[in-house]
Image (spheres, rainbow, N blue to C red):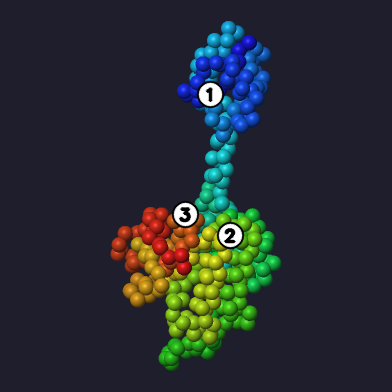
Amino acid sequence: MAIVTRVPLGFPTPSFSSSLSNASQCHKHRHSLVASSSPSTTSIRVPETSTLFSPYIILSNSSNSPFLQKRDTKGFRRVKVVSAAMADLAPSTVLVTGAGGRTGQIVYKKLKERSEQYVARGLVRTEESKEKIGGADDVFVGDIRDAGSLVPAIQGIDALVILTSAVPKMMPGFDPSKGGRPEFYFEDGAYPEQVDWIGQKNQIDAAKAAGVKQIVLVGSMGGTDLNNPLNSLGNGNILVWKRKAEQYLADSGVPYTIIRAGGLQDKEGGIRELLIGKDDELLKTDTRTIARADVAEVCLQALQFEEAKFKAFDLSSKPEGAGTPTKDFKALFAQITTRF
């Protein structure tokens, strides 16, 4: 009767029968003698972690004379390796909140277009907003100020992209022809404290509870200056509350990427050189704006690279035609040294 066992190259074989006897009782490697397809053959199955595996087998015939033979590479071991590789390539489920906004819509659309990488979800505030972006079943309606309403959208996701923000409205009756500056206000229940602080805190808490692997939060440059004009809009101190939410995320323990965008423009993306900064330094230059489409792309790219995790940075771009359009996002994120 022939006996087969798998061994590493260079495995000592002075006493084959002794090795086989020990191998059949080895608890360390957890292999055992199992019947092969041939009634005259017995083989030793070796698990993936065993040091006994090699591309060769020791074969012993009825005269107990061992010899080496190359193993069949279509064996059971390879199936597990392929399955693990396929699992690693499974698309990530990503939720973008504020998906009805001008930047959020772009992020949601990009996620949908890259279905081989992502399973897209969106969160909007109203049924009207849901219909505006297609009304698909992967768009949830919820109120970020109500933590409980976020649970259905967040359960089962791998990553969260936060693009919610309070939006000031212009007071009616302003006539630009008369000069002066317009006045702004926030609707009741939609002040920055409620949306940019409580609402974002609710999202971070829900994501953490659901085991989300990464949160990308889009904020604004200007948060280092309490006197920034944006804080005076509707007396909302919007940058103060945004900064508070950013700090909460940084302290949460969840891997994060905080993107503080410059002035947002409704222009084509992918045709400008992107600039990374910190502490509002870019606001002191002539390159203080960025296309919404470029911000959206950076959000998605941040999900792809370890270099983007536990980072916070300002983001703007050079004018179109100046510099080289950014394509290497890993290198872009590698520039960042600030955690907050």
Q: Residues within 10 Å of mark 2 (few under 14, many from 20)?
A: many
Residue 42 shows up from this direction: yes
Q: How many circles with numbers are drawn on the protein? A: 3
Q: Residues within 10 Å of mark 3 (few under 14, many from 20)?
A: few
- Expressed as whole percent of the image width and height from the top left, the position of residue 35 reads 67, 19
Identify which amino acid the numbered label 3 is placed on. Answer: Glu
Res 229 → quadrant: bottom left
Residue 292 shows up from this direction: no
Which numbered marker is on residue 261? none
Which residue was labeled with disc 3?
306
Q: Is residue 52 above or below residue 284?
A: above
Q: Which of disc 1 and disc 3 is earlier in sequence?
A: 1
- Expressed as whole percent of the image width and height from the top left, the position of residue 127 reads 65, 67
Identify which amino acid the numbered label 1 is placed on. Answer: Val
Q: Are marks 3 and 2 in contact (CB under 8 Å)?
A: no
Which residue was labeled with disc 1?
7
**How far apart in space, not on screen, are marks 1 and 2 (Cα)?**
48 Å
Q: Are marks 1 and 2 in contact (CB under 8 Å)?
A: no
**How far apart in space, not on screen, are marks 3 and 2 (Cα)?**
19 Å
| Residue, far right | 148
Q: Is residue 176 above or below residue 85?
A: below
Pick the residue in front: 37 or 254.
254
Which numbered marker is on residue 95? 2
Identify which amino acid the numbered label 2 is placed on. Answer: Leu
Q: Residues within 10 Å of mark 1 (few under 14, many from 20)?
A: many
Query: In front of the other: label 3 or label 2?
Result: 3
